[in-house]
Image (tube, rainbow, N blue to C red):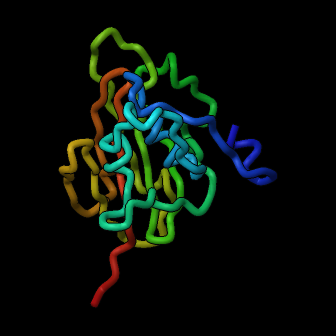
């Protein structure tokens, strides 16, 4: 919906429960969509660990996006529930981009593979890429012309933070 509606309205999602089995993928989807991340758990069921990977360190604030999250151009007309590869959603931030690969096709346990390429983002300069892991670990490198490979299972996701490199 954001592809068609974002130029006219502010897209918003319903609340999520951090105690549900699918809460991680829902929290990430809301964050990359650029809308508020609302939770509706009771106080005793709220799980802060679901939101922690989405927060700016030391600020307890979700990384703010500057637009609505959109699929990459080459995947706009694909059905992510039947395509056996991860589906990319990208958004801009004040520091660069956030890109998330979602595993939305039930592949029966098979791994889905996809590469995000610089041409998918129309980058004007060299960028660094940080792949953020749910358990707080990450992997960083230059975002080269070969792109960034991800491998996912059904209902999995991979978050990439991209920032422009500047010479000192």
Residue 52 percent across, percent down from the top left: 33, 49
Residue lying furthest top = 108
Q: Please identify the quadrant where the C terminus is shown.
A: bottom left
With 65 as the anchor, is 103 left or right in this view?
Answer: left
**Identity of the residue drawn at 49% across and 51% down:** 120
Res. 24 visible in picture = no
**Identity of the residue drawn at 28% across and 13% down:** 109
Residue 76 percent across, percent down from the top left: 61, 36
Q: Quadrant of residue 48?
A: top left
Question: Vertical placement of 38 versus 104: above or below?
Answer: below
**Identity of the residue drawn at 39% across and 72% down:** 164
Residue 36 percent across, percent down from the top left: 58, 50
Question: Vertical placement of 32 versus 110: above or below?
Answer: below
Residue lying furthest bottom = 168
With 55 as the anchor, is 88 left or right in this view?
Answer: right
Residue 34 percent across, percent down from the top left: 57, 52
With 22 as the anchor, is 144 left or right in this view?
Answer: left
Res. 31 visible in picture = yes
Q: Please identify the quadrant where the N terminus is shown.
A: top right
């Amino acid at each position: 919906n954001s592809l068609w509606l974002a130029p006219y309205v502010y897209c918003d999602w319903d609340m999520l429960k951090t105690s549900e089995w699918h809460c991680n993928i829902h929290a990430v989807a809301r964050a990359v969509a650029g809308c508020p991340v609302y939770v509706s758990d009771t106080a005793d069921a709220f799980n802060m660990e679901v939101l922690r990977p989405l927060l700016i360190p030391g600020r307890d604030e979700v990384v703010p996006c500057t637009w609505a999250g959109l699929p990459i151009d080459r995947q706009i007309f694909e059905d992510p529930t039947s395509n056996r590869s991860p589906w990319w959603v990208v958004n801009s931030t004040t520091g660069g981009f956030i890109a998330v690969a979602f595993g939305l096709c039930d592949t029966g346990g098979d791994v889905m593979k996809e590469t995000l390429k610089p041409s998918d983002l129309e980058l004007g300069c060299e960028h660094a890429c940080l792949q953020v892991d749910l358990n707080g670990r990450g992997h960083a490198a230059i975002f080269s012309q070969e792109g960034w490979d991800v491998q996912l299972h059904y209902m999995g996701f991979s978050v990439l933070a991209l920032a422009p490199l500047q010479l000192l």
